[in-house]
Image: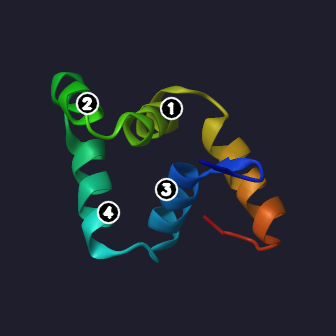
Amino acid sequence: MKINNLTEMEIKIMHYKLGILGSGMTALIDAIFKLDRSNRNKIALGFPELVTICNRFNDESGYWENLEKRFEEQFNSKTSL
């Protein structure tokens, strides 16, 4: 589901980076960032968008800056990350 210009999972990643996400999702995202590609692919069966965002964060130049900018525009706040 897209909320204005961010998806629900993009908002969750931003909340994770800001340290305000619940413990269950935080543990899941922590695990995704620590896993190798093979195991990430397995987690992607249940959480495809979340794994894609984590992969883009790690691999795609400029993705994080763009996501941070869109979050700040939508919520009119500075993330200071």
Marks 4/2: CA–CA distance: 16 Å
Neighbour class for label 1 at 10 Å: few (<14), some, many (≥20)?
some
Q: Position of residue 79 (x, y in %)?
A: 67, 69
Neighbour class for label 2 at 10 Å: few (<14), some, many (≥20)?
few
Residue 80 against residue 46 in the figure, above or below: below
Q: Label 2 sits on what residue type?
A: Leu
Q: Are marks 3 and 1 in contact (CB under 8 Å)?
A: no
Mark 3 — residue? Answer: 13
Looking at the rendering, which quadrant does residue 32 occupy?
Answer: top left
Q: Secondary structure at mark 4?
A: helix
Neighbour class for label 3 at 10 Å: few (<14), some, many (≥20)?
many
Residue 74 against residue 49 in the figure, above or below: below
Neighbour class for label 4 at 10 Å: few (<14), some, many (≥20)?
few
Residue at image position (25%, 55%) is 28
Pick out the residue farthest to the top: 38
In the rendered structure, which disc, 1 or 2, sits on the residue that comes first in sequence? 2
Mark 4 — residue? Answer: 25
How many labels sit on residues? 4
Mark 2 — residue? Answer: 45
